Amino acid sequence: MRRKKPAMILATLFLAAFAMIAVLAFLSKNIHEKKNGFNRRLHTVLKLQKQITFPVSISRIIGSHENKLYFQGNDPYKIYLTDRDLNFLKIIPLSISPDVKLNSGVRMLLNGHHIYLSCRNMPGIIDYDLDSGTSDSHVLKYFYNKEAVFSKDQFILRTKDLKTNDPVFIKLDLKNENARVEDRFSEKNGKGSFSTDGILYYDSTSHLACYTFFYQNGFICMDTNLNIKLKARTIDTVTKREIKVARLASSLTMKEPPQFVNYTGAVAGGTLYLHSMLKADNEYSLDFMENTVIDVYNLINGAYKGSFYIPAHKGNKLHQLHVIDKKLYAIYGKSVVLYDLNITADPL
């Protein structure tokens, strides 16, 4: 009998440890750590359809033209090409004169067979013709921090008002760079751009430019003549984060980074797909932590259409996404994963 006691003790300890783990898992799944004051209509978790691995980390999807997808890495002198089904991989060198100001901070945009290299630090835009392999540089007289291309040589930029230094949207035509057309809806109160920082997109279906905010609720839509068409709220309840600003020499900087409300996203077919950084009250903590939640909105009326999860891939969450028709492409470092958005009877 004495020989059986150690075995019984070990078995009891094992069962107790297993029970404790089960209880902790149950609690983490069912207890909401924080109430944010809103709920989501969650549809599903997207399922991986196909993936492709690149030789380098991909920073963003440049765009699509004639069933081809173009990708940007960290080298401003080359791009990567595949088709919409991720069937092959090709590297395309760009015949652009070397410049010390061309670095990994360059942001590439696609319109037709033209790739535009947005060089915010120059400031300027390089027009590269994929068909001819030639480029044309355009130096701008002002700095900017957001850009979207909506037609050949036609852009919407976010820059500073010449008098107040507050952020404004302007329309740029590379054929007439001296013409500066500003919007009439941006606030000019001398408080800078930190609180309204975000991302600028263009949707070719609705012909609307969409701007989403990092630190506050909502998004806006404007036409290509900078007329405001929509001011909408996202489902979260954060109207504005408190931004603490400090002056450093002649410039302003944030004392500490505020918590994001919304992060990256994509627009396509009159729809905004927005990566939210806030957990809803009806979500489980583990589900929110293990997946990227995407909230879906109508760009015409701002209506919330529902949400879905994009799972982590090889232990990593996505850092950028792109939507074409009903295909969603998610970037995870060197991997790009294709997901199908035809996921429920209730269309998103």
Image: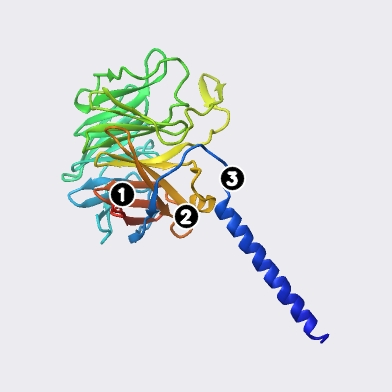
- State the count of labels: 3
Q: Which x, y percent locates residue 343?
A: 31, 55
Instruction: Tell me: residue 304, above or below residue 167.
Output: below
Q: Which x, y percent locates residue 292?
A: 44, 49
Distance between the alpha carbons at the discs numbered 3 and 1:
39 Å
Amino acid type, callout 1: Phe
Amino acid type, callout 2: Asn
Viewer-nearest residue: 113 or 94 = 113
Is label 3 in a helix, a strand or a loop? loop
Q: Residues within 10 Å of mark 2 (few under 14, many from 20)?
A: few
Q: Is residue 6 left or right of residue 155?
A: right
Whether tag 2 and tag 1 are in contact, CB under 8 A, the answer is: no
Check disc 3 and report the residue beneath it.
Answer: 33
Q: Residue furthest top?
A: 163
Q: Given this view, does label 3 or label 2 mark the residue nearer the observer?
A: 3
Whether tag 3 and tag 1 are in contact, CB under 8 A, the answer is: no
The tag earlier along the polypeptide, 2 or 1, is 1
The label on residue 316 is 2
Distance between the alpha carbons at the discs numbered 3 and 2:
23 Å
Q: Given this view, does label 3 or label 1 mark the residue nearer the observer?
A: 3
Q: Is residue 141 left or right of residue 290?
A: left
Q: Residue at x 46, y 15 (%)?
A: 190
The tag earlier along the polypeptide, 3 or 2, is 3
Instruction: Tell me: residue 18, above or below residue 298.
Output: below
Check disc 1 and report the residue beneath it.
Answer: 71
The tag earlier along the polypeptide, 3 or 1, is 3
Whether tag 3 and tag 2 are in contact, CB under 8 A, the answer is: no
Q: Residue at x 23, y 47 (%)?
A: 64
